[in-house]
Image (cartoon, rainbow, N blue to C red):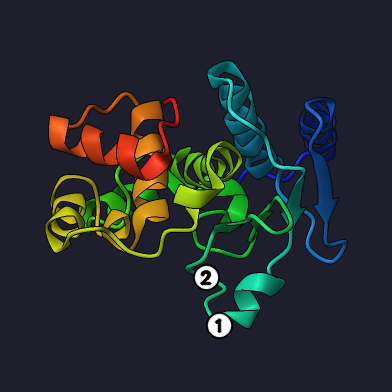
């Protein structure tokens, strides 16, 4: 059942996010459901507890996904140049106040796109990019794995997305850590190497 958007809860979530030093910038034409903002706020709170850096801004805007021509399938992205996370409220993941997020996360985990089935996965993944960038920009900018066998291991043990490149590997592994998942020693060695020693 769809839960009506609560303006009071929306404003409370925005205040809570901004009290953490993160500016919320919304597109006035597509105000975000309070559950999406509460999900973002919970992810920021988790990052603070881990001692990780936070982005400067949370942008609520689907125009980035429109430019990539994948509005429905691209829920969020981190920009190291702007130090911001853009949330796409029109994505399948965030539509209707995250009503279908659990089912969508389970589906993405089942097809090995995500490393977890948590509704927190998307925000944890993007906040992990932010943490990685602030911790070690050199390793964040790596475009490929040192060995093909590492790419294959990332795909087999973590997710297909983790096999795309080292920054996606780090974001997928760290999102899984935050969900309580553990990995083999080989994955842990790769994580330490490609993250520049980023703490979990």
Which residue is at a point 61% across and 28% down the rendered structure image? 42
Mark 1, secondary structure of its residue: loop
- Image quadrant containing the C terminus: top left
Q: Residues within 10 Å of mark 2 (few under 14, many from 20)?
A: some
Q: Where is residue 41 in the image (x, y as percent from the top left)?
A: 67, 32
Quarter-of-image position of residue 175:
top left
Residue 19 position, x and y percent, is 83, 25
Q: Is residue 68 above or below residue 82?
A: below
Return the residue nearer the eye: 196 or 161.
196
**Left or right of 133, for residue 62:** right
Residue 67's x, y, as percent?
A: 64, 81
34 horizontally vs 135: left or right: right
Q: Is residue 43 above or below residue 51?
A: below
Residue in the image at 32% along x and 51% along y: 114
Question: Tag on residue 72?
Answer: 2
Residue 69: which numbered mark, if any? 1
67 and 117: which one is in front? 67
Q: Position of residue 157 (x, y in %)?
A: 16, 45
- Which secondary structure, mark 2? loop
Residue at position x 63%, y 61% in the image: 88
Badge 1: few (under 14), some or many (20 or more) residues near its Cα, within 10 Å? Answer: few
């Amino acid at each position: 059942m769809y839960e009506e958007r609560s303006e009071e809860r929306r404003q409370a979530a925005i205040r809570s996010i901004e009290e953490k030093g993160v500016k919320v910038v919304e597109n006035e034409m597509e105000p975000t459901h309070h559950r999406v903002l509460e999900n973002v706020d919970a992810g920021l709170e988790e990052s603070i507890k881990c001692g990780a850096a936070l982005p400067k801004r949370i942008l609520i805007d689907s125009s980035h996904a429109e430019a990539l021509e994948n509005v429905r399938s691209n829920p969020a992205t981190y920009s190291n140049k702007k130090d911001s996370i853009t949330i796409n409220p029109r994505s399948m993941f965030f539509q209707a106040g995250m009503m279908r997020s659990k089912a969508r996360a389970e589906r993405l985990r089942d097809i090995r796109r995500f490393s977890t089935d948590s509704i927190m996965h998307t925000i944890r993944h993007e906040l992990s990019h932010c943490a990685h960038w602030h911790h070690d920009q050199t390793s964040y900018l790596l475009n490929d794995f040192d060995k093909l066998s590492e790419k294959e291991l990332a795909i087999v043990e973590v997710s297909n997305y983790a096999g795309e490149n080292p920054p996606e590997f780090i974001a997928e592994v760290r999102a899984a850590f935050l969900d309580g998942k553990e990995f083999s020693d080989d994955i842990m060695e790769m994580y330490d190497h490609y993250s520049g020693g980023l703490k979990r």
